[in-house]
Image (cartoon, helix red, strand yellow):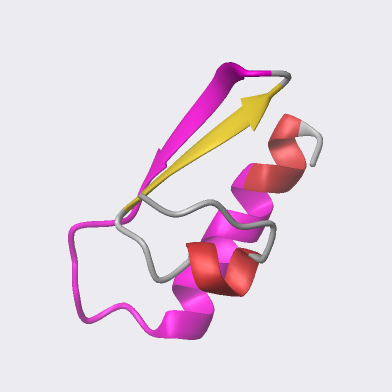
Amino acid sequence: MMVTHDAKVAAKCSRVLYIVDGNIKGEYVSPKDLEIKEKDRERSLNNWLLELGW
């Protein structure tokens, strides 16, 4: 497990939990396709975080 506020670092992980005040507000699971470019995974994660209000 790792804690970060850096979306670039989080994009390298296969599962990301969005936590606010100790409560899990959302879970992001990276697409199964390992051929997805790192920038595309980072963009997808950033969009998800923006939807949650980050």
Pinpoint residue 26: horizontal percent, then vertical percent. 53, 26
Q: Quadrant of the C terminus?
A: top right
From the viewer's perspective, is residue 16 above or below residue 25?
below
Q: Which residue is at a point 67% across and 66% down the rendered structure image?
A: 6
Nearest to the observer: residue 36 or residue 28: 28
The image quarter in which residue 37 lies? bottom left
Task: Please count the marks in the image.
Answer: 0
Pinpoint residue 40: horizontal percent, then vertical percent. 49, 76
Q: Is residue 2 left or right of residue 48?
A: left
Residue 40 is a magenta residue: yes
Which residue occupies the extreme right position in the image?
A: 53
Q: Which residue is at a point 54% across and 60% down the rendered structure image?
A: 44
Which residue occupies the extreme top position in the image?
A: 23
Pinpoint residue 18: horizontal percent, then vertical percent. 58, 34
The image quarter in which residue 43 lies? bottom right
From the viewer's perspective, is residue 37 above or below residue 4?
below
* Span colored in magenta: 22-48
From the viewer's perspective, is residue 16 above or below residue 30?
above
Q: Is residue 33 left or right of residue 12?
A: left
Q: Which residue is at a point 19% across and 74% down the rendered structure image?
A: 34
Nearest to the observer: residue 45 or residue 24: 24
Nearest to the observer: residue 46 or residue 19: 19
Q: Is residue 1 left or right of residue 7?
A: left
The image quarter in which residue 36 lies? bottom left
